[in-house]
Every structure is written in structure tokens, then in C-alpha cells.
Image (cartoon, grey):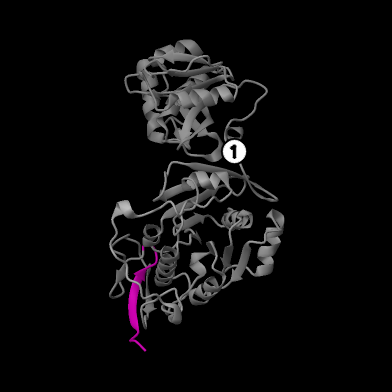
Amino acid sequence: MAKVKTAFFCQNCGTQYAKWQGQCNACKEWNTIVEELVQKPEKSDWKSPNTKSKTVSVPLKINEIDTAKEPRLDTFDGELNRVLGGGIVPGSLTLLGGEPGIGKSTLLLQISLKLPYKTIYVSGEESPKQIKMRAERVNPNSSNCYILTETKTQNIFKQIEVLEPDIVIIDSIQTLHSDYIESSSGSISQIKECTTELIKFAKETATPVLLIGHITKDGNIAGPKILEHMVDTVLQFEGDRNHVFRILRAHKNRFGSTNELGIYEMQGSGLREVTNPSEILVSKKDEELSGNAIAATLEGMRPLMIEVQALVSTAVYGTPQRSATGFNAKRLNMLLAVLEKRAGFRLGAKDVFLNITGGITVDDPAIDLAVVAAILSSNEDVPLQKDFCFAAEVGLSGEIRPVQRVEQRILEAEKLGFDTIFVSKYNKISLKNTAIKVQLISKIEDLVDLIV
């Protein structure tokens, strides 16, 4: 038996120390350093002792490496495919995080039941009967999904060797423990060791592994920060449990873009893909209201129509308030200064509240024009026509600046039935025979004359 080694880890950031101290030097948190027993009798391996490989990796020329034999695996879920960049890459590790009850387990169970590949769903949190009860609501007739309730990694790998699945799903990484580390499940050292074993298994067998990860009260993945560096893809499942819509984002993706967005609707039968996000981001109103404007934005390659709501009112308490939900508050202050300086609107003594509907956060500068239009509409109490939409950036001198892929935004607006879209005069547009009117403007004063 090897000598037992004691180490001290920060529970917040995972930094290791030789002895205990009150404050972590890395993250500056107090009383987060705990002692853990670290014991490794031999180097861990996911394989059983009698099947360990004796092969040694050798250098290969990059132009001789063939990737055609390992195409991406289709998840049969359009939203997940989009966020991952076209499907699951063989041998990759994907980490899915989100708040408790948001639908992480439901999403991966639903995908495992739809896949035509042999899938093993490993759960350390539920019994087989509990998983079956949830599966009956989604797809009870799947014959390719195998359920395993186990938390010890050595036992999991034994079953994987027997079953030889195409995809492995772990729910969750914080519940696993390895015999090579003598500490409780969910500790820093256990999470690192279990993830290391799963990475070695995935890379050697080209089997993709999907992990569910818990998050802290700050919204970060629980465990050491190194966990997010070890995996290939980090997905975040967001949303309000009081609402039915969920948003899937990629915070890290080695095989695709991190700008893509997937939207789901939580129903009694599981999660429904929302293929037309504008249906939830733009509200349907019978009467026209002031302070509402529609912006044409982009999330990755997907065009979205979002609704911007603004409320301008007289400041009652002396100091005007500036509040923005889903939009950068500093950029809102900049746009208000441009309106006051270039368009002559006196907003310095008024409260301004801004909201992006649907619970999403947008950082696309192309919604600047819609924000300005909503503020002007609320300030003058004049509703905008409901078939107007906007796609342009506003500069500090009041000029209307061009934005990227404006033609894609115009076509999306036309598809959704808008009659007029306001864009920059300096955008190069080659579209012809479109049903939508493209209104070209060059400065903010032009917008004021057209809508107020």
C-alpha cells in the first residue's frame, strides 16, 4: 500500500496548498480550504488489469490523419446539433451545467431515448424505476438506451467494456468516485480524478461522453475550474423555472462556434425544440403600445427577431434611474447621451427602463437602433407601427453604422411578415424583388423624423 498523502484544496477554485490557511491566494475567498486524503497505489486506468493496452502513441503527420471515418454523430435534436456545431464529435467530452430543476437530466435522457445508437445512461442520483417514470413521458419504447445506477468509476468501466456503447451519459460527475482517491464524492480531487479517467476512456475508444455538472449559487460549474479546461465542450442550460422556455448556450466549444443558441419549451412530455424563436421573443398584441420596438439580431448563424421594451418617465426621487434587463447598462447610458446631444431630447431628468423580452441577454450592437426607437416612442408616447423593425448600430456622433449580414436579417424580417426594416445607408445590399421595404437612414435625426 502506498503512503497516504494529505493535500489541501480550495473548494471554490481548486487551488492546491501544502498546508491549511484561512484565505485562498487565488480567489481570495475565506474558509474554503479543506484537507483531503490523496492516495494512488498505481496510475489509474479505465481498463481492467487484464485488458490494458500495451500500445504506445507515435507521432503522425497531420496530413496523414484521416477524419472521414469518424463523422459527427447526429443527436436527432436540431437545437443541440446547432449548439454543438453539427453533432457530437467522437471521443469528445461535453459538460452540461445548469440550475437544479432546469431540465438537464430530462434533456440528456430525452436525447438518449431518441438516438438510434447504443447508449448507456449512468445515473448516480436516481434509481432505475425513477428514470423509467420520466422516460415514459418522453419515449418509453426505446430499445437502444441502457440504464445503469452506479457511482464507482471502476464498476462503470466494467459494464462499458461488456456493453460497448456508442455514447456514454453521466448524471452527474459530482456523484462519481474512484477507488484511487480516498475522499468523498464531489470533492475537488474526486472530480478531477473521475474526469481524467473518463477523458482517457473517451480518447482511446473514440466514444463521446456527456457529463451533467452541478452549479454553485454564483452560477458557475461546481468543482475546480480546471474541470472546464479538461473537457472539450461546456454547455449551459439557462432559464427561469417559473417560465416554460429554456436556452442552451455553448460557453466553450473546441469543435464549433460559441455564438450559437438553442431554445426549448418545457412541456409535460419533455422538452420541445423551438425552431422559430421569434414566436416567443416577439409578443402578439392586438393594440399598439408605445415603447415597443422590434430588432433583427443574430445569435451565431441564426437570425432572431426580438422585442425591445422601454419606459421613460419623470424622475420622482430626484436622481434619475437607468435600468436595463438583458442589455448592457453602460451602452444604454451612451445611447441616451447621443439622443440628448444629437437629437435634442432632454432625458437627463427622466427615469429610463429597458427590457429585452423572452429572458435572453443580447450583446449585438445591431439592436442599438431598436433601443433608440423604443426610447423615443415611450418618451413621446407615440406607438411605433407594428410592422416596423430595426437593424443598425448607433455611433457616438449620431451616425447610423452598418452591421454584419444585414441581408440575412432583412430576409428573416420579411419571412415573419414585417413591412419595413430600418438599416444603415452605408450597408451594401444586393437583394432584389423583396416584399419588405428597406428604409435607409444615415443619422439619428432621420429616425426621429420618420417615427416621431
Q: Is residue 184 magenta?
A: no
Question: SS for tag 1?
Answer: loop
Q: Position of residue 97 (x, y in %)?
A: 49, 55
Residue occupied by mark 1: 275
Res. 247 visible in picture: no
Q: Position of residue 381 (x, y in %)?
A: 55, 18
Q: Identify which residue is drawn at 41% across, 75% down.
A: 45
Tell me the quarter of the picture where residue 386 sits: top right
- Decide which of 391, 410 is in the foreground and name it: 410
Q: Position of residue 391 (x, y in %)?
A: 46, 24
Q: Position of residue 164 (x, y in %)?
A: 54, 68
- Decide which of 5, 345 is in the foreground and name it: 5
Res. 64 visible in picture: yes
Would you place residue 142 above or below residue 80 in this image?
Answer: below
Tell me the quarter of the picture where residue 258 sits: top left
**How many numbered marks, from 0 up?**
1
Q: Identify which residue is drawn at 60% across, 57% down.
A: 112
Give the extent of the magenta segment. Answer: 1-13
On the picture, is 276 further left or further right than 196? Answer: right
* Type of the residue with mark 1: Thr
- Decide which of 252, 198 is in the foreground and name it: 198
